[in-house]
Image (spheres, helix red, strand yellow):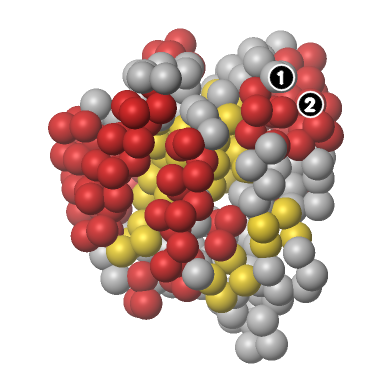
Amino acid sequence: MTTDKIIKSLTPSDNFFLLAGPCVIEGEKMAMEIAEKIVETTTRLNIPYIFKGSYRKANRSRIDSFTGIGDIEALGILRKVRKTFGCPVVTDIHAPEEAEMAAEFVDVLQIPAFLCRQTDLLIAAARTGKTVNIKKGQFLSPEAMQFAIQKVRDAGNQNVAVTERGVSFGYQDLIVDYRGIPEMQKFGCPVILDATHSLQQPNQPKGVTGGRPDLIETIARAGIAVGVDGLFIETHPEPLKAKSDGANMLPLEQLPQLLERLTAIRATIAGF
């Protein structure tokens, strides 16, 4: 799928678009199972879909935390998902030298929230010509994201989106300020709401991030109600066994019904 088609899927329409998949690629069988289930549901509901999977996790609380199965192996799995199911794929990058490598395998390069101000990283991602999705830092106002967006555009790439994923509240919680969605839409790019990372509970004493997956639907419903362009949802067949971010992921079996309800809300909103 060409970059132009990716951008069209990120353009506001009668329905929202979806970035969804596991936190990190744990293996081929798991990735293909998740992709097949989501493609089946999004096709039925006419939701433009991008498969999400990190090929490596660079930001972990503890040094003994799982980081990945190997960069090239994981990126190869992402490429196979794209070829098998015909959907674009997105993955995170963490350093400028990763941009060109990852761009050979995926359609969208995602900038992690903690790195959203890293100029060299943003420019390297932009210069690949791929769509760049910038996750808003937990420490930034919505208005401040215009400068991250502009770095990508000034590097010659107009294919950019931004993702809201909550703001730090104290040491171990996040909150979503829904006013930020229309504020960031003023910058002329699609705005995505991360309905799973917004419910993280970071900095836990044991060094394992917590979460409130019971509130995923609440966060997503509110986002659709205020007109967000896309949703980001991490999902796994067995979140409690996931090797990263299991505490805030949606069980895969619950995703179809959630998307049905969200699509119905979107259709209702569009009627006003």
Quarter of the image that includes the C terminus: top left
Q: Is residue 193 left or right of residue 137?
A: left
Q: In the image, which disc is placed on residue 106?
A: none
Tell me the crowding category of disc 2: few under 14, some 14 to 19, or many 20 or more residues within 10 angstroms, Cα based.
some
Write the residue at 29% across / 71% down: 238
Residue, far front = 272
Q: Label 1 to label 2, Cα distance in Å?
A: 6 Å
**Residue sitting nearer the eye, 149 or 87:** 149
Q: SS at mark 2?
A: helix
The answer to whether 194 is drawn above or below residue 22 in the figure is: above
Residue 144, percent from left and from top: 83, 34
Give the labeled residue for mark 2: 146
Give amino acid for label 2: Gln
The answer to whether 191 is drawn above or below residue 30 in the figure is: above
Count the numbered circles shown. 2
**Residue sitting nearer the eye, 225 or 187:** 225
Residue 136, percent from left and from top: 70, 42
Q: Is residue 188 left or right of residue 137?
A: left
Residue 253, percent from left and from top: 22, 60
Write the residue at 59% across / 79% down: 208
| Residue 88 visible in the current orientation | no
Quarter of the image that includes the N terminus: top left
Q: In the image, which disc is placed on residue 187?
A: 1
The quadrant in which residue 15 appears is: top left
Q: SS at mark 1?
A: loop
The answer to whether 199 is drawn above or below residue 127 in the figure is: below
Q: Earlier in the sequence, mark 1 or mark 2?
A: 2
Give amino acid for label 1: Phe
| Residue 245 visible in the current orientation | yes
